[in-house]
Amino acid sequence: MLELKNYVNGEFVSAHDGQTLDDINPANGEVIATIPRSKANDVERAARAAEHAQKDWNATSLEQRIVWLDTIADALEQKHEAIAQAESLDTGKPISLARRVDASRSVENFRFFAAFGREQTEMTFKMEDATNFVHRNGLGVVGLITPWNLPLYLLSWKVAPALLMGNAIVAKPSELTPMTANILAETLDEINLPKGVFNLVHGLGPEVGQAILEHPSIKGISFTGGTATGRIVAATAAPLFKKLSLELGGKNATIVLDDADLDKAVPGAARAAFTNSGQVCLCGSRILVDSKIAEQFTSALVKEVESMRIGRPDEDATQIGTVISMEHLLKVESYIDLALTEGGTILTGGTRSMTGPLDHGENGAYLAPTVIGGLPHWSRCATEEIFGPVVTVHTFDSLAEATEIANATEYGLAGSIWTKDIEKGHALAKTIDTGIVWVNTWLHRDLRTPFGGVKNSGVGREGGQWSLGFFSETTNVCVMDSN
Ligand code: NAD
């Protein structure tokens, strides 16, 4: 069993009071690691180290920091398989998904921001008699708080631009999935990133997370997680005038028009609903289908979903692993029970496992991908974020009704539209209150584009320029011409 440590000022250390928490494998309930149960004094040490290191780090040139990002990408790439294995063990996601998505994207995040940094030019605004030069500096120390669904993918998505812009970091990964953050810390240690530039503090949200939010030396908070936690983050950090980026929950609509190519729309909708057992903030957890094709679409969807292979996360052929924990499984199941009381019908799934491996028995957090029909679009199951392998199917009779249903939640993160008429799809996309809409695809990402949500799905954007903007302060220097 691994004994993970915090990484503070270039050293791997236990929590000050020596307390630990167990890290559980959701596929069998076994303890796979312990992590420090850190407290405010551990955050204090990390923040002090970061504050000290940041000045020198910010004084390095952009070019030097770009080289560091490439060096990190090279070093992480060597650990691609180790990252995938750790992520699969910690989260219960299929190893194939962890390889293809988590491990690859974690490397790509550093590569992307290195390349993007190279493209940056100094911004100037010429006046008749003067020139304005916009200088960008790091904010100082930033706090990065991340969830369990895409652990290193999301942490590296913040670490890379934060380092690029000259910040030092105090990071807190989810206590449920701490392993790959340690692989990152070990990697940064091996390549001799200057001490204190990256610090990692493990523990519980209300203890470590809260201490990061409150620490006076931490000038910016980039948070990805649930909307309820985001509210606490905003309430704590806003009165302290910290810069805030909030990437929160979603209840995204997959809209299937009557002219959609069902050979693409059906697998597309199934992938959007059930990737990572529905535990991606962008997952399409509500399918809105034109009533004219609803029967045909729904029966094809059920067939598609029933062909998905549930199995041990470490087996190559597995497409659906476990959800993150038994506790989360109970929450998701409570929504399935609720759906029945709200008038829904389970079209497939709803059970703990269809083909779940016997040797993992009842301790594995397996849940069959579940499709529910017959629910009013305003029911709780169709409007609240379940964050599990559950999708609800609803019908509409006009594009206006599709928009109305799509917008009838407190969330506004993402969505997809399936149609052969690209212009109609594009026009419909503009009527959805959301940060991202895909037409005839899902989770097709260009890292230069803005990523984030509206309404209760978040505040601010990440990606490309938006990340560089968040992780920097600008100073405008206006210089009068000499003659
Ligand atoms: P969560 O809100 O429970 O936890 C997220 C992180 O916040 C964890 O590290 C947790 O320890 C920490 N935390 C908890 N309480 C805190 C507090 N009081 N102060 C500071 N930090 C605290 O979320 P989760 O269950 O880990 O993740 C699932 C949620 O994340 C879903 O709602 C999902 O939609 C959302 N999510 C959003 C995006 C996005 O980009 N919008 C991406 C991934 C996940």
Image (tube, rainbow, N blue to C red):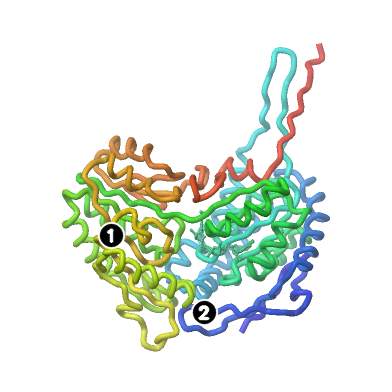
| Residue at figure coordinates x 24%, y 42% from the top left | 420
| Residue at figure coordinates x 68%, y 56% from the top left | 143
Q: In which quarter of the image is ligand 1?
A: bottom right
SS at badge 2: loop
Q: Name the residue under label 1.
A: 375
SS at badge 1: loop
The 10 Å Cα crowd at callout 2, few under 14, some 14 to 19, many 20 or more, is many
Callout 1 amino acid: Leu
Residue 364: quarter of image: bottom left
The mark that comes first in sequence, 1 or 2, is 2
Q: Residue 177 carries which label?
A: none
| Residue at figure coordinates x 67%, y 80% from the top left | 3
In the picture as drawn, the residue positioned furthest to the front comes out as: 341
Relative to the observer, which residue lies in front, 480 or 407? 407
**In this picture, residue 150 sits left or right of residue 252:** right
Relative to 200, does residue 227 appear above or below in the rendering? above
Relative to the observer, which residue lies in front, 478 or 330? 330
| Residue at figure coordinates x 38%, y 73% from the top left | 333
Residue 121 in the image, given as x and y percentages of width and height? 65, 34
**In this picture, residue 111 sits left or right of residue 328:** right
Q: Name the residue under label 2.
A: 25
Relative to 209, does residue 56 appear above or below in the rendering? above
Residue 21: quarter of image: bottom right
> Looking at the figure, which quarter contains the N terminus?
bottom right
Residue 460 in the image, given as x and y percentages of width and height? 57, 44
> Looking at the figure, which quarter contains the C terminus?
top right
Callout 2 amino acid: Asn
Can the viewer see residue 15?
yes
Relative to the observer, which residue lies in front, 457 or 128? 457
